[in-house]
Each structure stands twice: as C-alpha cells, then as structure tokens.
Amino acid sequence: MTMKGGLVDPATKFKKRVASEDTSAYKVVKRGQLVVGFPIDEGVLSFQQLFDEAIVSPAYGIWDVAKPEEVNPNYLERFLKSPQAITYYLGKLRSTTARRRSLDRSSFLELPVPLPPREEQKRIAGILDQADALRRLRTRALDKLNTLGPAIFHEMFGEGIANGKCWGTCSLGDLVRDDDRINYGVVQPGDHDPKGVPLIRVADLTSPVVDFTAVKRISNDIDENYARSRLQGGEILIGCVGSIGTTMVAPKDFCGANIARAVARVAIDPEKCDPEFVAEYIRSDLVQRYFQKEVRLVAQPTLNIKQIRETKIVSPPRELQESFLKRIGVLKKTREVVANDCLKQETLFASIQHRAFRGEL
C-alpha cells in the first residue's frame, strides 16, 4: 500500500500487483473490509473499496465491520483518521524489540467510536469529504507552483552544462565558503527535548512552511557536539536519504537550528555565486539525474558528501543570474501566500473533524 503524509493515498492504494505467483505469504482483503497497518504510528488504515479482492502484506490486519447496517464505511474511515483517533493511537503505542512503536490489536479494537444514526453519519462524512476536497485543491495549487521554479530555470539556462553556451563550470565544493565545508548533521539525536534545539529533517525540506512548534528538538548537549552543522540561515540544505536531492535554502528563522544526519549543509560563498541560483540549479533535472545515478545502496539509498562536493555547477553571467532571481523572488512570494493558506486549511480541516465527531456540526 502507498502512504502519503502518513496516511494511505486513496489514489494509489492497492494498485501494486505482485510479480511472483506465490502469494501464500499475503492476506486477501475483500471489498468493504477494513485494512489496518501495524505499527500504526502513522495511521495507516483504509477500507478496501476498489476491487472485489486484493492482497496485502501479512503486517496488515483485516476486519469486517461488526454491524454494517449501523456504520457508514466512509464515516468510520474518516473517524479512524481523525485527530481524536490518532491521539488515541499515540497514547497506546508500545515499544517493540525492533525499536519501533506498535499498537496491538486489542488496543485498536478498544477505540471508542461515536455512532450517531446512520443518516447523520452519512451527512458528516459528506461534509468532511467536501472540506477535504477544498484542502486538496490548495495543496495541488502549491504543487503546481513548485514546478514553476525549475521551468523558469530551464527556460533561461537550458540543461546547464549541456546547453552549448561557453559558461564556466566548477564543482559545488569550490563554491563553499573558505572557512567552511559541506557536512551532514546529527547522527544520534536522542529523545525529543521540548526545550531543546530545533532539528531540521529531510521531511522539513519538502514542507512549504516549517512549524517550529512541532519539529523534533534535540538537547543542548547534543547540539554542542554538532556545532559544525548548526545553521545560520542562507545555507543550502540537501536531502541525502529518502527524498534524495530535495533542496531548500535555509531561511533566516532557521538560525540556531541544527540538521539531521540525512541532510547535507552547503554554505555557499555569496561572493562566488548566489545561493538561491545554486539551489535552483541543484533542483534541475541535470543535477537530480546525477544524484540518482550516484546514490549508494547501503541499508537504504544514500547520497554522500563526495558526490555532493563533486556536483558540477555552471556559472552564467551575473546579470542573467540576477534576472532569474528577480523572477524567482516573485514566485516565492506567491508560493508563501499559498503555503500559508494551505496551513490555514489544514487547521480548519482539523477543527471541522473535531467538531464532527463531538456532534457539533
């Protein structure tokens, strides 16, 4: 099953076909049955409504709704993914020998579910569907805006090295400040410290706005041991594990934060090249293809410092860079407005969910 944002993505769930003919290790789930993934710290659950039968990993639990005549499946699925339900799951999670938190079957089945009359369930589910659809429209608008930066870059600079222009090239490492170097971040962040230092992780590089009230924080003692990766703002941050090649320029409010081991910090000397231009160049198809080619398979695909340092960067005339950055500046302001609207929509949707399952809609 495909997860998106911690939840099953309805557009892709159950689409994967198993290539092997031996499916004995899998479970068969029929249309209308509830599928629950364990561990459930990310709320992986959904009704199977796309096929008469599908197969899922043995790690998933499968249940029939006890009284289908009393429960609207869409209403139940909405409740099981609501903030109230997620809070319940998090309160029941237990550590396992594999150092992962898991919710056992009995605790999941003990979750109290509010059950108004079936027609009321259908009405509530319909309201939540509409609110969710509006929320997704905002998100799609932001996704479209995120594609404009690379499009503008390609329009102005083509494929960079391969564009046939007589522009100088250098390695990314050559653009780093003379008193600095490219480096990873904190290897073992330890437990969350509410009063500690914010830790920027790969997932934060894809967020339109980083919520510092929700990010993981590390103790000041751990931060002191990783002063080399502490941020001042203006550094290029590159995802090295998971979302490889994800890139952002650290905003000023990142000053004082640190980064995780899966993030590389690149402090560009602005006298050598503009960091915003370099960041957009790294996002280009040319560099992204290079990253994907150079990743190393250890426990999971990883981009290392050597590959980042050796990344070839083209240096167009300064006036062309400045023209590009003016266009990108307008785009960034628009993107910030839409991103803030997305956050407001998320907050509003969570509020509607709370009200819906307290009988206040």
Image: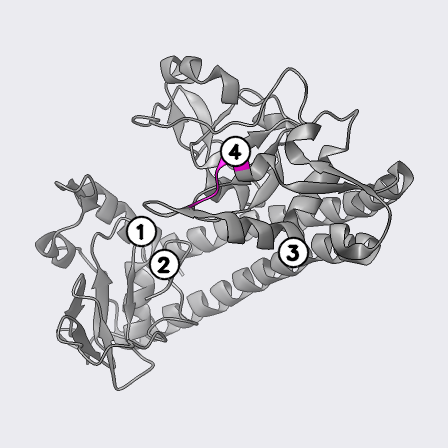
The residue at 21%/52% (across/down) is: 39
Which amino acid lies under the numbered mark 2 shown in the image of this protein?
Leu
Residue marked by disc 1: 42
The residue at 70%/46% (across/down) is: 281
Marks 1 & 2, CB-CB < 8 Å contact: yes
Residue marked by disc 3: 285
Q: Which residues are magenta?
A: 302-306
Marks 1 & 4, CB-CB < 8 Å contact: no
C-alpha distance separating marks 2 and 3? 29 Å
Q: Looking at the image, is mark 3 or mark 1 earlier in the sequence?
A: 1
Q: Looking at the image, is mark 4 or mark 3 earlier in the sequence?
A: 4
Residue marked by disc 4: 264
Which amino acid lies under the numbered mark 4 shown in the image of this protein?
Ala
Which amino acid lies under the numbered mark 1 shown in the image of this protein?
Glu
Q: Could you classify mark 1 by the number of other residues whose Cα lies within 10 Å: few (under 14), some (14-19), or many (20 or more)?
A: some
In the image, taking residue 194 as reference, residue 29 lies left or right, namely left
Residue 207 location, x and y as percent? 54, 45
In the image, taking residue 63 as reference, residue 53 lies left or right, namely right
Pair 2/3: label in front: 3
Q: Nearer the viewer, residue 124 or 6?
A: 6
